[in-house]
Amino acid sequence: MNAHPPHIWTDWQAQQRAARISSADLLAAVGLSAADFPAGVIAAPEFPLSVPPHFLSLIRPGDRHDPLLRQVLARGEEAAPQPGRLTDPLAEADYRAAPGLLRKYRSRALLIASGACAIHCRYCFRRHQDYGETMLTRSREAEALAAIAADSLIDEVILSGGDPLSLPDARLAALVTAIAAIGHVTTLRLHSRTLTTIPDRVTPALLALLAGTRLRVVIVAHSNHANEISAEVAAALGRLRAAGITLFNQSVLLAGVNNDAATIAAHCRRLFAAGVLPYYMHLTDPVAGAAHFDVGEAEARRIEAGLRGLLPGYLVPRFVREVPGREAKTPLADLS
C-alpha cells in the first residue's frame, strides 16, 4: 500500500501534493472495489478526494467498514436526495466582517487563512465553499488585520480554513508576525486536521515559529477515531507539547465512525496519552452531501451519558451543535 517514493515520507509538502487520489486508486490501495459498497461509489465527485499517504496507510485493507475509510471515500449516499441540506449550513456569509475575516463571537476573530486542506473529509461543512471569494489573501490581508486592530475587545485570533497548516512556513510566519503586532491580541489558535494526517508537518521551522511568538498558542487538532493516532502522530503532538503549545482535539459525531461510547472513550484515552485534551464533540452540520453521517440527538444523548460512566469528567468532550445566529456553541442538553 505504501507505493509512494521514499522522499514522500519526510517531505510534508510532497505528501500534501500526493494526497489527491481517485476513487478507483483509493479502493485499489485498500484492496476493495466499488462493488463492495451497496450504494456504490462516486467515481468523480464534485468535492474531490484527498487522502494523505500517512492517513491512507492507517486504513485496514479489505475492510469496507473501516472508520477511516468511511471519512474519505465518496460513497453513493452523497448523491442521494437530501431535503433541507445546505451549502452554507452555518450561514457564515452573514458573519463576514472583511475579506477572509469572520466575526461570530465578541472576543474572537476567525481568519480563513487557507483554502487548501490535505484531507477532504466527506462531512466537511465547508465542502461547497468558494475559497476564491472567502479566503484571506495577501492583497486582502491588510483590511482584515486592520479590522482586528480596530476592535480592542478581540483578544484571540483563530486561524482556520481549509487548514492553516497547509500554508508554507514563510507565509504562516508572516501572518503570525502580523497578528502578534496587534497589541490587544494575546492568543493565537489554529484549527488543523493536518497534524493527524501529515505528522511530518511538525517541522523544526514550525516549532520555532510557534514557540517564538509572544502570543499564547493553542492548537485544536481534528481527529475522530483512535486509529488516527499513530505512533508518528503521537510523536508530532509530543514535539508541539515540548514547545509549549496547548493542545486540544475536536471531533465530529459520525454514524459508522465513532457513534458509540466505547469507541469514543478509546479515542479520548489515546488522545490524552499523546498529551491532547478532548474538547468538543460536534453534532454534524446540515451540509449538502453528508446526511448519511448524521447521528440523532437522542442517540447522541445516550452516547454522552455512556461516556460519563466510562471516563473521568476531564476526558469527556463537550457535545455541542453550532446553531447559526447563536452567540456560542449550543450544548447538547440545551438543544430542543
Image: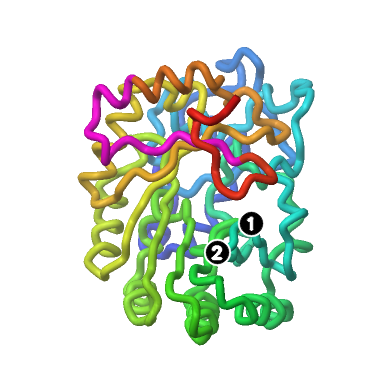
**Mark 2 = which residue?**
108
Q: Which residue is rendered at x = 54% and y = 38% of the image?
A: 330
Could you tell me which secondary element the residue under label 1 belongs to?
strand
Query: How would you rate the neighbour count of disc 2 (Cα within 10 Å): few for under 14, some for 14-19, many for 20 or more?
Result: some
Nearest the eye: 17 or 282:
282
Nearest the eye: 268 or 32:
268
Q: Amino acid at mark 1?
A: Lys
Disc 2 to disc 1, how far (Cα)? 8 Å
Q: Quadrant of the C terminus?
A: top right
Colour treatment of the image: rainbow
Q: Which mark is residue 104?
A: 1
Q: Amino acid at mark 2?
A: Arg
Q: Identify the magenta region.
A: 306-322
Contact between labelled residues 1 and 2, with CB atoms less than 8 Å apart = yes
Determine whether 90 is above or below 258 in the image.
below
Q: Is residue 317 magenta?
A: yes
Q: Is residue 54 magenta?
A: no
